[in-house]
């Protein structure tokens, strides 16, 4: 045998096709009514709608149960994403029956938004409903949202901003009738998973090629950068902040702006800090 030392060739692992970061953080509420799902190539976020009646079920809000029941249904990962959305909707309906919720009173319904993707090599499948969103950022910096954003809270926040400018106290109390009117538009003008079959008309699904895709953000509305006087959500500003400072920097910018406006008057919103559930996927081409 030669006395010359022999060095084994290093074992090179193939590069992962994507890297994943996530964030799940409770806001100012009693419960974190957002939920997060990361399971191999399956990724999802769920945003339970805050209860307008305040009832608790086994110590948790209906919004918490809706988000977590939906997460559990998708975690089975045993069908198409659209079929899993149907399964999640049925799980919420069953949960309300078991909890003796009066489903004839639509303000009592447990509800959640959802945005879920499954990466299959050079393609990704998605399903989305409500204001949990999917945002694709491409190599050239152009971004796109495969499922449209329906800002059902815009009219509420427009009124909120007007009342704030007028110096109104207890703005939310004044807006309760309007907030309830908007909530009753669930699965009539905007979609949610809340046990109603009508959600099918608001469920968005499809596929995207991963070629040219640099980043994919899957997020609840807690990731929106606060904006003065409501209006449309500025996704271009959000994308720019994310590309410059990453998910951590975007999160810090949001919380800094919220902290500067504890009374929610400069940046109209329901509470000082919203829950956040976000998944950031960076593709390695």
Image (cartoon, grey):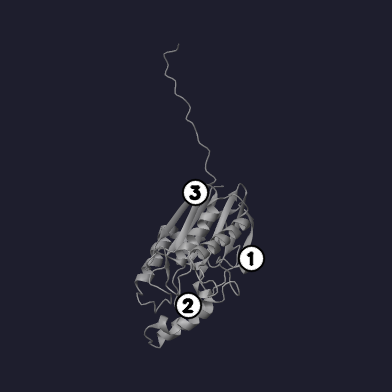
Q: Quadrant of residue 163?
A: bottom left
Residue beneath disc 3: 19
**197 and 214: which one is in front?**
197
Q: Position of residue 146 (x, y in %)?
A: 61, 62
Q: Secondary structure at mark 3?
A: strand
118 horizontally vs 64: left or right = right
- Residue drawn at the location 45% of the way across and 55% of the way down: 22
Q: Position of residue 30 (x, y in %)?
A: 37, 67
Nearer the camera: disc 2 or disc 1: 1
Q: Residue furthest top?
A: 1
- The answer to whether residue 10 is above or below residue 141 is above
Is residue 259 visible in this depiction of the protein? yes
- Of labels 3 and 2, earlier in sequence is 3
Q: Position of residue 100 (x, y in %)?
A: 49, 67
Are there few (<14), some (14-19), or many (20+) residues within 10 Å of tag 2? many
Residue beneath disc 1: 200
* Res. 106 mark: none
Q: CA distance from mark 3 to mark 2?
A: 34 Å
- Residue drawn at the location 44% of the way across and 20% of the way down: 6
Q: Residue furthest bottom?
A: 166
Q: Position of residue 272 (x, y in %)?
A: 38, 72
Is residue 243 visible in this depiction of the protein? no
Q: CA distance from mark 2 to mark 1?
A: 29 Å
Q: Quadrant of residue 173?
A: bottom left
Q: Are marks 3 and 2 in contact (CB under 8 Å)?
A: no
**267 and 77: which one is in front?**
77
- Residue drawn at the location 45% of the way across and 69% of the way down: 225
- Of labels 2 and 1, earlier in sequence is 1
Nearer the camera: disc 1 or disc 3: 1
> How many tags in the picture?
3
Residue beneath disc 2: 230
């Amino acid at each position: 045998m030669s006395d010359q030392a022999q060095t084994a060739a290093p074992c090179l692992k193939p590069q992962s096709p994507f890297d994943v970061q996530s964030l799940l953080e409770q806001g100012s509420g009693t419960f974190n009514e957002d939920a997060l799902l990361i399971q191999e190539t399956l990724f999802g976020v769920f945003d339970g709608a805050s209860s307008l009646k305040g009832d608790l079920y086994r110590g948790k809000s209906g919004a918490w149960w809706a988000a977590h029941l939906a997460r559990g249904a998708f975690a089975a990962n045993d069908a198409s994403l659209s079929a899993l959305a149907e399964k999640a909707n049925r799980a919420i309906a069953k949960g309300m029956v078991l909890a003796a919720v009066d489903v004839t009173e639509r303000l009592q319904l447990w509800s959640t938004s959802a945005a879920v993707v499954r990466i299959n090599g050079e393609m990704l499948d998605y399903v989305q409903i409500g204001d949990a969103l999917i945002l694709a950022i491409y190599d050239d910096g152009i971004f796109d949202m495969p499922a449209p954003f329906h800002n059902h809270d815009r009219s509420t926040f427009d009124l909120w901003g007007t009342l704030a400018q007028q110096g109104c106290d207890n703005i939310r109390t004044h807006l309760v009738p309007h907030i309830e009117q908007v909530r009753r538009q669930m699965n009539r003008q905007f979609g949610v998973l809340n046990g109603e079959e009508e959600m099918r008309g608001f469920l968005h699904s499809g596929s995207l090629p991963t070629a040219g895709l640099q980043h994919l953000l899957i997020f609840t509305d807690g990731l929106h950068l606060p904006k003065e006087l409501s209006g449309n959500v500025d996704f271009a500003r959000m994308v720019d902040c994310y590309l410059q400072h990453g998910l951590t920097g975007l999160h810090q910018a949001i919380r800094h702006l919220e902290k500067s406006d504890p009374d929610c008057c400069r940046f109209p919103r329901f509470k000082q800090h919203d829950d956040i559930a976000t998944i950031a996927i960076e593709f390695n081409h």
